[in-house]
Amino acid sequence: QVQLEESGGGLVQAGGSLRLSCAASGSIFSINVLGWYRQAPGKQRELVATITSGLTTTYADSVKGRFTISRGDAKNTVNLQMGSLKSEDTAVYYCAAGVPQPYGLGTSWTWGQGTRVTVSS
């Protein structure tokens, strides 16, 4: 099993920057993708960015050019550097770890408890 612990988040003014970090523990060698998702009030959870064990990254269109996802020096960590923040970036941000399942059964996801990011305009 995988456990995730997030850090960072908080209150920032529009145009500012913030960095989120997530550390995975447990069966970390089974993880093939780490990512960040977010959920704004009254909205569904959405993808922000992911990074695979091969360092392939994906981003939501809404954050491209402003956010950067990276793996930490310790391979069980993932960071999200957020810049040029907008009020619409306000949300609870969740770290996620994907573990491939055998027999083509897809990916099992583990979620962190979330960290709140509030961008004031």
Image (cartoon, grey):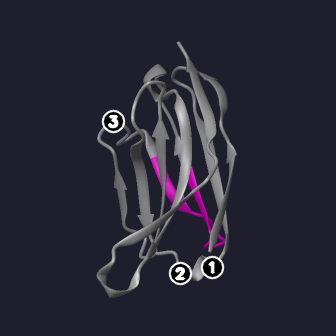
The image quadrant of residue 72 is bottom right
Residue 109 as seen in the image, left or right of residue 3: left
Alpha-carbon distance for marks 3 and 1?
32 Å
The image quadrant of residue 78 is bottom right
The residue nearer to you, when weighing 35 against 15, is 35
Amino acid on which the number 2 mark rests in the picture: Ser
Q: Label 2: which residue?
A: 30
Q: Residue at x 61, y 53 (%)?
A: 112
Amino acid on which the number 3 mark rests in the picture: Ser
Query: Where 44 falls versus 24 (above or below)?
Result: above
Where in the figure is residue 117, as x and y percent of width and height?
60, 31
Q: Residues within 10 Å of mark 3 (few under 14, many from 20)?
A: few
The stretch of residues the image draws in magenta is 68-80
Q: Are marks 1 and 2 in contact (CB under 8 Å)?
A: yes
SS class of the residue under badge 2?
helix
Amino acid on which the number 1 mark rests in the picture: Ser
Q: Residues within 10 Å of mark 1 (few under 14, many from 20)?
A: few
Q: Label 3: which residue?
A: 62
